Image: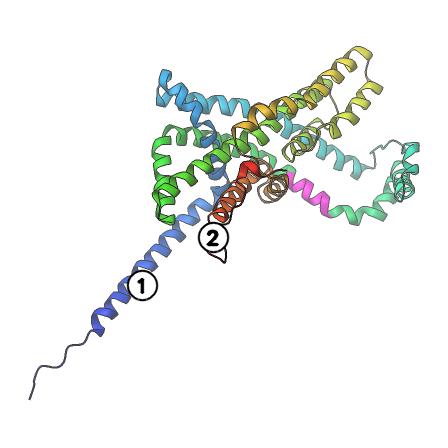
Amino acid sequence: MDLNPPRSDHAPAHSTVLYVALQLALIAFLVYACGRIILPIAGILLWSVILAVLLYPLHLRLAVRLGNFWTALLIGLVGVAVTLVPLIMVATSVGTTVYSLFSDLQNNSLTVPPPPPRLADVPLVGQKLTEIWALIATNMPVALANYGQMLRGPAAWLVSSTGGLAASVFSFILSFAIAAVIAAYGKGAAAFAQRLVRTVIGSETQGGRLVALTAATIRGVALGVVGVAMIQSLLIGVAFFAMGIPAAGLLTLATLFLGIVQVPATLVTLPVVGYVLATEPATPAIIFTVWTLAAGLSDNVLKPLMLGRGLDVPMPVILIGVIGGMLADGLLGLFMGPVLLAVGHVLLMEWLRGQPNEDGLRIDHPTPREVRR
């Protein structure tokens, strides 16, 4: 009789399953705990990474003369100073305009000019728009009673967006400070990104290529799209504020929005130019007209210089990124949305280019440079 019971392999397998389950539970808890900390500032961190990638070549050039620490400090201070003044001016102007508008509506003191005579000649909608405009200009309480329900949603969104401008200004300042720190540790950050992508993909060559492609896309879109729009809107906004144009902040934001979605800024500047020519003395009105029109056409010079450094991205991708980013993260999302969506589009196209079709052949998709708007 065999007194030794037969050995079983179930115990080691059972302990292995428990060990793997414990590992997964600890990893899940760690991800959850870190996510709770990072999630409130995820947008700021993403924009900081974008700024760091954009500013890293400049950091390398200056670090040769100033050193790593002083270069990061200089870039952070200059970035905060350059960003802070225009943002505060625009945010203050937008807040004042919205407050005055709602205050005048509550006090029934809002004055609206009569509709232009040519508006009634517009096919299909001209007559109806003329009647609504005339009612608003002559009897504001009745107009609000008839159409106020339709305006509640947009008005609530406008008030909430205006209230978030102060937070957006703080987010931009904090983003530049974090970006300067990331740029100071650029080599380590790049190495970490390559290791992470290599671990996910399983190929060191492909991982390095995707990291380089992502950096090139960020610089291309941030400089050629967002950067050009910011420079153009800054030039136009200076003229708006110098002339004391009503709602100069809102008009500057509208110019920035149109510039990012690749729509000519003249849609905003031409009506303002007409207003200035009709209401201001001849000499300042002519100077304003020349400056504004030149600034509105400046993108034709800036885009070939700055967009040529990066990759072309279809305009619908930029438009969806702008609208979605603005709805999700306000003013910060207006800049961050198109860059992130452009990176996602480029990486998706790069992945599709490497996929085999049903016959086992590689699909020959166009590269991002060959994608036309």
Magenta stretch in the rendered image: 153-161
Where residue 223 sits: x, y (%)? 54, 28
- How many marks the image carries: the answer is 2
| Of the image marks 1 and 2, the number of the one nearer the N terminus | 1
Residue that extends furthest to the top in the rendered view of this protein: 283
The residue positioned 79% from the left and 35% from the top of the image is: 104
Residue sitting at 47 percent across and 50 percent down? Answer: 362
Q: CA distance from mark 1 to mark 2?
A: 40 Å
In depth, the one of 269 and 242 nearer the eye is 269
Name above or below for residue 92 compared with residue 128. Answer: above
Q: Residue at x 85, y 32 (%)?
A: 111
Residue 227, image x, y percentages: 57, 28
Frontmost of labels 1 and 2 is 2
Whether residue 45 is situated above or below residue 145 in the rendered picture: above
Q: Which residue is the site of mark 2?
A: 361
Q: On the picture, is 230 further left or further right than 150?
A: left
Main SS class of the magenta portion in the image:
helix
